[in-house]
Amino acid sequence: MKLFRQSLAHKFRNGIQLMQTQSAQNHSDISLNPNIFASLLQECSHVKSVEQLHTQILITGLHQNHHLATKLVSIYAKHGFMEIARQLFDKIPTRDNLLWNVMIKGYAINGICDESLHLFYKMKEENLQPDRYTFSFVLKACAYLSALQEGKEICDEVVSAGLALDASVGVSVISMYAKCGRVDDARQVFDNISERNVVSWNAMISGYVWNGRANEALEVYHQMQKENVKPNRNTFVSILRACVDSKNVEQGKKIHEEIRKSEVELDVVLSTVLIDMYSKCKNMEFAREMFDKMYRRDMVLWSAMIMGYAHSGHANEALRFFNQMLQEDFKPDLITMSSALAACAHLSALRGGKSIHGYIVRSELKADAFVSTATALIDMYAKCGSLELARHVFEIMPKRNTVSWNVMIRGYGMHGYGENALELYLQMQENGMKPDEVTFTNLLSACSHAGLVSEGRKQFDSMVQDYCITPREEHYTCMVDLFGRAGHLDEALDFIQRMPIEPSISVWGALLGACRIHGNIELGECIAERLFNLDPKNTGRYVLLSNMYAAAGRWDGVLKVRAMVKERGLKRTQGCSYIELNNRVHAFVMGDRSHPQSEKIYSTLEALSKEMEKAGYVPDTNFVLHDVEEEMKESMLSSHSEKLAIAFGLINTSPGVTIRITKNLRICGDCHIASKFISKIVGREIIMRDANRFHHFRDGLCSCRDYW
Ligand code: ZN
Ligand code: ZN
């Protein structure tokens, strides 16, 4: 009989038409068999087929059959049609445990969890004793609702029902406690379960991951291996999440190896988690290797790759992937677009950023979603040197949050427009927005870059007194920077000595920078010494000290620093300048002759330097760190990466167009002077972003007013 049913079910798998023919033949014996209907219902892949069968069942009068009625309820619930399921359920006169369980499960798996809980109480009112299945489903609902109180009460019932040691109920209890934030209670239950299977282990591992306790998740995983329980796919998914959370790429690689050796198939979900793990742990080569192997790629995958590249400093690759994703007709989500915008911001790739902006406008985002994306846009425009566009996006935003205001204020600060930053801050207060720590960091930094000492001091006091914000390391750093930059070195020192917390590396670093600007070698040497002890691997500071010696003509000092760098095995970061042209980013290093346009670039520079000399430019050879002939120094200066990028920009853009350049290190002093001259000679604005801030060169002047 069973075999017969199976073969019949198979026959009908592809449609219900045959069934209808049969019923037309005056209800043959077969079609009156409720079991056959039940197996046919089980086969339905679409609710339409369920409805057709349902009609047949009504015609035949078989809906009175309890087994078949229960099956119908369960199938509608499985397809997510809880309203129909409920109507049927309400009409069934005698309801047994199985039927109640079907409904409680249906509500729970369809996310209508309060109704699931409600039905559970109703079931008990009708004097039915919940069984292990009832408990499992209703506990799932509690977990979803984070309903700890109800969950605990149900756990008590589980104990009185004698199911405390049951493995399947135990899993639900563990998940419930974990999802309600009580992972230690979950652990206690886990430890008490007598026969633990892979599902119980998984519940405990994912419970720890859910609560952000990755290390404990890993411990449980190791214990599981010791007890010779074979991990399954879900185990691997959870444990890889733990590796992501704890940024433990070594462990992640081991798990990857274990997956390879196991019988678990590397499906889309598992591959995506692996790629996510590698990209979040900034191990993009591995992520890429996995990505290339996958034949089916979905949005999550693309997103993980783009995010991984963007946040690991491979902005160029991030943009390349983003464009490729668009070409393959995937619609990026908000997170992916924000990552791509961050990549543009990093590279100062204004054109790329603009095209993403266009894409966002076309995709008609909801206002809520727009706040975060618009904020990413503001940040991108500000970092690409276009404050006007940043402000434009800011103005047309339908809704702004604190982050949007903060990002716009920071934008003004980076570009040296301290007054605008302060004005915007005033507007922020008028709009009833409360500033936070970040607002003040941005504000103080804006004051510092614009040399607004008394205003900065005022804001610092206001932060403490009016907003009760305890100053943090970055606030102190901004203040020291503010005093130091403006030449008040004594006040900066005094401020450091009165700090209630131990001055950090960045605070001393700010003071060292000030010593360089104002040529105070004695204090500079003293601070550098301290910094070299605190943070011996930061090459930038050795360069800073070396520059100070060089500027004072103290070659003995330069040699001393160079010896130190060599002795400690440090490598100087090579200076590199970027410029975007036609959606591609071109990079230049000092003395670079690798670019196809090299010849033209050097001849342009030569012609420019003649005009500059006529206009009164004298190369500032202090910025050459080698003890060489003056003439040699000049030629070395003229091939600095900043100048190469400027010349490249001049050659490839129309007259009058603004040239935007990004440098990975601080701009060199001679290039700063030269850029001022060039901006006047060619009548163009040159916007240069260096590691610290923006310089807008216009008409022979720089927006930083030479404070940098
Ligand atoms: Zn230079
Ligand atoms: Zn400047």
Image (cartoon, helix red, strand yellow):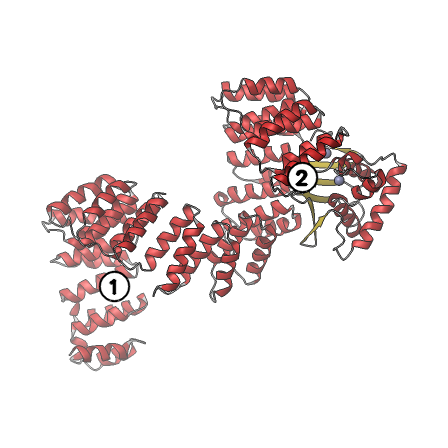
Q: Is residue 229 visible?
A: yes
Q: Is residue 641 left or right of residue 498?
A: right
Q: Mark 1 sits on what residue?
A: 75
Indicate the amino acid at tag 1: Ile
The part of the image, by quadrant, that contains residue 52 is bottom left
Q: What kind of element bears circle 2?
A: loop
Which of disc 2 and disc 1 is earlier in sequence? 1
- Is 695 situated above or below 462? below
Q: 630 or 564, which is in the foreground?
A: 564
Picture residue at 54% right of the left edge, 62% below the top: 329
Q: 120 or 482, which is in the foreground?
A: 482
Residue 44 pos. (x, y %):
29, 69
Residue 240 pos. (x, y %):
39, 53
Q: Mark 2 sits on what residue?
A: 690
Picture residue at 43% right of the left edge, 56% below the top: 274
Q: Which image quadrant: the N terminus?
A: bottom left
The part of the image, by quadrant, that contains residue 696 is top right
Q: Is residue 693 left or right of residue 48?
A: right
**Quadrant where ligand 1 appears:** top right
Indicate the amino acid at tag 2: Asp
Q: 221 or 267, which is in the foreground?
A: 221
- Is 63 situated above or below 169? below
Q: Which image quadrant: the C terminus?
A: top right
Picture residue at 22% right of the left edge, 77% below the top: 6
